[in-house]
């Protein structure tokens, strides 16, 4: 009997110390029971990440997509989706904050759902990161009726590939909060979403290069502006559908 294939997409930028252990741990955990296609969307790293990936690709099968130019988080995910061959796509960040063993929690809950999100009950992020996420989620629930969801920014997700490809093409406003827009658009497309609690831990090494305190005002402004654009667009589409 042929094993089901799951495509793991890992967006990565400047994670030289983390990317090797992350890939190895996911491969060891999953590949013996489910055929795992590993897709690494490397995004203009300058810290030795490319070297680590080339070395690891000699021992672990993977689709290695490397770029000297920055595509951004969403751009990397979209590029990775173009290579996905599995019925389901597993999305996860490359900083080591999620446990590969929690994949089975998501995978075993997939029947009857289009997307299974890893709900971080106890987030291990910095205070600034948690505050920003809480704020975005509050306004996301308020503007788009997402009150039943508890973690709309969750990066650890198992999604049917066809849905992931369709929704990712629609995401165009929220750069630093890709998953917020992805969740909003998935629900507006009628996707059945289930949240499953997963563990969340501190980064393996290093610190985030995106959500630093000095960058927060600019990020918050851009993301609120993007959220309003989505709201206006969806409201206009709803109005037009009744004409």
Image (cartoon, rainbow, N blue to C red):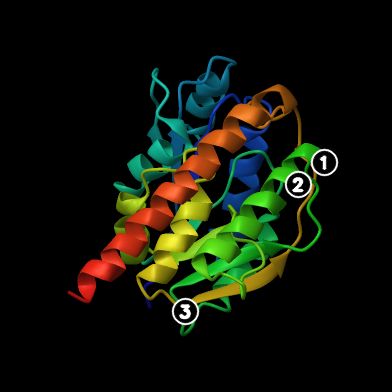
Q: Which circle marks residue 127 in the picture?
A: 1
Q: Where residue 29 sits: x, y (%)?
A: 63, 58
Disc 3 target residue? 113
Cα distance between the residues tagged 1 and 2:
5 Å
Toward the viewer: 142 or 15?
142
Seen in the picture, residue 86 relative to 82 is either above or below; the reply is below
In the visual, does 150 lie left or right of 123? left
Observer-side mark, 3 or 1, equals 1
Local secondary structure at mark 3: loop
Residue occupying the point 37% across, 73% down: 2
- Is disc 1 in contact with disc 2, using a CB cutoff of under 8 Å? yes
Q: Residue at x 48, y 49 (%)?
A: 227
The foreground one among 243 and 125 is 243
* Numbered label tally: 3
Q: Quadrant of the N terminus?
A: bottom left
N-terminal label among 2 and 3: 3
Q: Indicate which disc residue 130 carries.
A: 2
Say few, some or many: other residues with alpha carbon within 10 Å of mark 2 (under 14 / 14 to 19 / 20 or more): few
Which element is circle 1 on? helix
Measured along the vertical axis of the image, is residue 60 above or below residue 182?
above
- Whether residue 171 sits left or right of residue 110 in the image: it is left
- Evaluate if marks 2 and 3 touch, with contact meaning CB atoms under 8 Å apart: no
Judged by depth in the image, the label closer to the viewer, 2 or 3, is: 2
Task: Give me the residue at 55% from left, 72% from top.
Answer: 107
Residue visible at 40% across and 27% down? 66
């Amino acid at each position: 009997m042929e094993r089901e294939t799951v495509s793991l997409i890992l967006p990565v930028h400047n994670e030289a110390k983390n990317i090797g252990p992350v890939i190895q741990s996911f491969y060891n955990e999953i590949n013996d029971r489910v055929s795992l296609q590993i897709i690494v969307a490397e995004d203009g790293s300058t810290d030795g990440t490319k070297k680590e990936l080339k070395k690891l690709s000699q021992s672990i099968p993977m689709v290695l997509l490397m770029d000297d130019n920055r595509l951004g988080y969403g751009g990397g995910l979209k590029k990775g989706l173009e290579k996905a061959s599995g019925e389901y796509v597993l999305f996860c960040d490359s900083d080591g904050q999620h446990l590969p063993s929690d994949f089975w929690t998501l995978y075993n809950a997939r029947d009857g759902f289009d997307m299974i999100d890893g709900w971080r009950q106890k987030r291990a992020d910095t205070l600034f990161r948690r505050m920003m996420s809480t704020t975005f989620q509050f306004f996301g629930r308020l503007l788009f009726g997402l009150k039943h969801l508890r973690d709309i920014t969750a990066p650890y997700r198992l999604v049917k590939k066809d849905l992931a490809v369709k929704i990712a093409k629609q995401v165009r406003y929220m750069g630093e909060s890709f998953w917020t827009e992805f969740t909003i658009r998935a629900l507006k497309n009628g996707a059945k979403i289930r949240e499953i609690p997963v563990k969340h831990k501190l980064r393996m090494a290093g610190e985030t290069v995106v959500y630093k305190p000095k960058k927060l005002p600019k990020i918050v402004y851009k993301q609120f502006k993007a959220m309003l654009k989505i709201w206006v667009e969806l409201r206009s589409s709803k109005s037009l559908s009744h004409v």
